[in-house]
Image (spheres, rainbow, N blue to C red):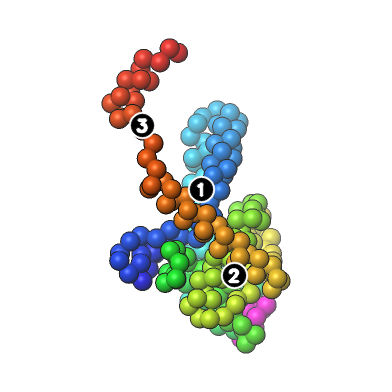
Amino acid sequence: MTTTKRQYFNQHGLKLPGVTEIIKDPGDELDLLYWAGKVAIEHGTPMAAARLRDEAAAQGTAVHEALDWCVKNRTVRAEAGPPVLRRAQHLHYGLCDRWPGSPIDSEVAITSTARPYGGTIDLIVWPKSGPVIVDLKTGNHLDKGSVLLQLGGYRALLRERDGVAADLAVLWAPRADHTRTELIELTREQADLAEQGFIAALGRYVAVQQLSKAIKFPRLAKKEATQEVNNAPF
């Protein structure tokens, strides 16, 4: 099995889905379209939603990358530097304060050998009591269902690799409030349910992929489809 940045391949070179792709809810796209339409009306331009989406994604990526740098370089909290670095240093300090003296790994990519998927874990803390998988979230709202399934997928990967049942936690740093940080730790029972839920979601995903390959619905060729649209009575 090989793993590159956010891409996962099996021993035959076949690309595998990541955890976030597997747990994606089809309803999310409808919610996104509704939000995009609302934003377009409010701002008077259809490009507003794309701009806000890209800005939010860039901010989230920046915090993730800065925290990864802090963990790898073992930096302590400081008041100097760019705001995103200070935020990341504060988050790193909080983790070190919660689990003092414990090693921390960041951006840990794992590809399963038993199941067709892979994933990249934001953070793994290694206290003596056992590993803790920590997922960093920078959105202004937490989707409980997707967060739990995502953590469950990472837990199954680490269990397969190391033979341990990790504890799970969410490190929430909403971009709308740079002073707010919450570490939400799951119970062992919640962690077990999250892992079981992901395994079920993976089974559904695989079944849908197999059906889509086995059943071919007729569709117009691109030229025919264009002609049909041009001839439509509206």
User: Which quarter of the picture shows residue 17?
Assistant: bottom left
What is the crowding at mark 2: few (fewer than 14 residues within 10 Å), some, or many (at least 20)? many
Q: Which mark is residue 206?
A: none
Q: Are marks 2 and 1 in contact (CB under 8 Å)?
A: no
What is the crowding at mark 1: few (fewer than 14 residues within 10 Å), some, or many (at least 20)? few
Label 1 belongs to which residue?
55
Label 2 belongs to which residue?
134
What is the crowding at mark 3: few (fewer than 14 residues within 10 Å), some, or many (at least 20)? few
Q: CA distance from mark 2 to mark 1?
A: 24 Å
The local secondary structure at tag 3 comes to loop
Comparing 192 with 89, the one in front is 192
Q: What count of labels does the image hold?
A: 3
Comparing 157 with 34, the one in front is 157
Mark 2 or mark 3, whichever is nearer to me:
3
The residue at 36%/71% (across/down) is: 1
The residue under label 2 is which amino acid type?
Val
The residue under label 1 is which amino acid type?
Glu
The residue at 36%/65% (across/down) is: 9
Magenta-tinted stretch: 96-101
Residue 226: give x, y in percent of width and height.
Answer: 33, 24
Label 3 belongs to which residue?
219
Whichever of callouts 2 and 3 sits on the residue coming sooner in the sequence is 2
Residue 26: give x, y in percent of width and height.
Answer: 54, 44
